[in-house]
Amino acid sequence: MNASAASKTLSASAVWFRRDLRDFDHAALYHALKASQKVFCLFVFDTDILDKLPSRSDRRVDFILRSVLELRAALRQKGGDLLIAHGSARTLVPDLARRLHVEAVFTNHDYEPSARDRDAAVAESLGQAGVAFHTFKDQAIFEKSEVLTGQGTSFKVFTAYKNAWLDKLD
């Protein structure tokens, strides 16, 4: 996975929306639009997640559906669209990338262990097809190893972390 976009202009790319269902202040969308002549937007109702829910009428899914439809409307208002798919993202994202003939898929970082495993599988599948996979920091101000102790290790005391975080913010 690479956090920097390709240096040459891409003919087509895709933005894979996940938790970040907005058409503004969206790092992956910004980088895809900057790097590509044509950008496809997509959202996958991931059955690897949905099939584990206790009920088919889960209110969280209804909320996500409404948010996805709002995002689609906002993109359409700006002359774009949102492809909405249902299935395993591990296979659907690479399949859609192939069918759309994109050179890269852009998305924002997802931090949960199962999401990181999914992203690694998607990146590997895309890579085998010659499609780049770019991820970006978007939903956090600082992430991963951006705030560390003076010795370069993780903080063990919250107050010390908070103070270092606030110092770095300035």
Image (spheres, grey):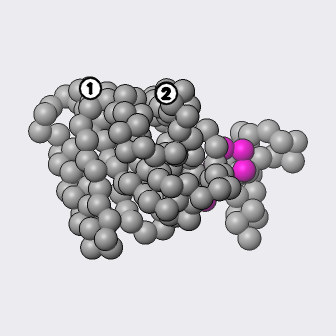
Which of the 4 image quarters holds residue 55?
top left
Residue 76 rendering spot, x and y as whole percentages: 27, 68
* Predominant SS along the magenta part: loop
Q: Is residue 127 visible?
A: yes
Q: Which residue is mark 2?
A: 125
Q: Please say if 122 is above or below 108.
A: above
Q: Residue 61, how many percent across, how many down?
A: 21, 44
Residue 170 image offset from top left, x and y in percent:
74, 70
Residue 68 sits in which quadrant? bottom left
Judge the density around disc 1: few (<14), some (14-19), many (≥20) Cα neighbours within 10 Å.
few
On the picture, is 158 further left or further right than 134? right
Residue 51 on image: x %, y %: 23, 27
Name the side, left or right, on which 23 lies relative to 57: right
Within 10 Å of disc 2 (Cα), the crowding (few <14, some 14-19, many 20+) is some
Q: CA distance from mark 1 to mark 2?
A: 24 Å
Q: Residue furthest left?
A: 57
Q: Earlier in the sequence, mark 1 or mark 2?
A: 1
- The reply to whether residue 93 is visible in this rendering is no
Query: Which residue position holds label 1?
Result: 52
Q: Residue at x 79, y 39 (%)?
A: 153
Q: Amino acid at mark 1?
A: Lys
Amino acid type of disc 2?
Ser
Q: Report the magenta residues as a range.
A: 141-146
Which residue is depicted at the point 68% across and 55% down? 7
Q: Residue at x 49, y 27 (%)?
A: 125
Is 103 placed left or right of 60 in the picture? right
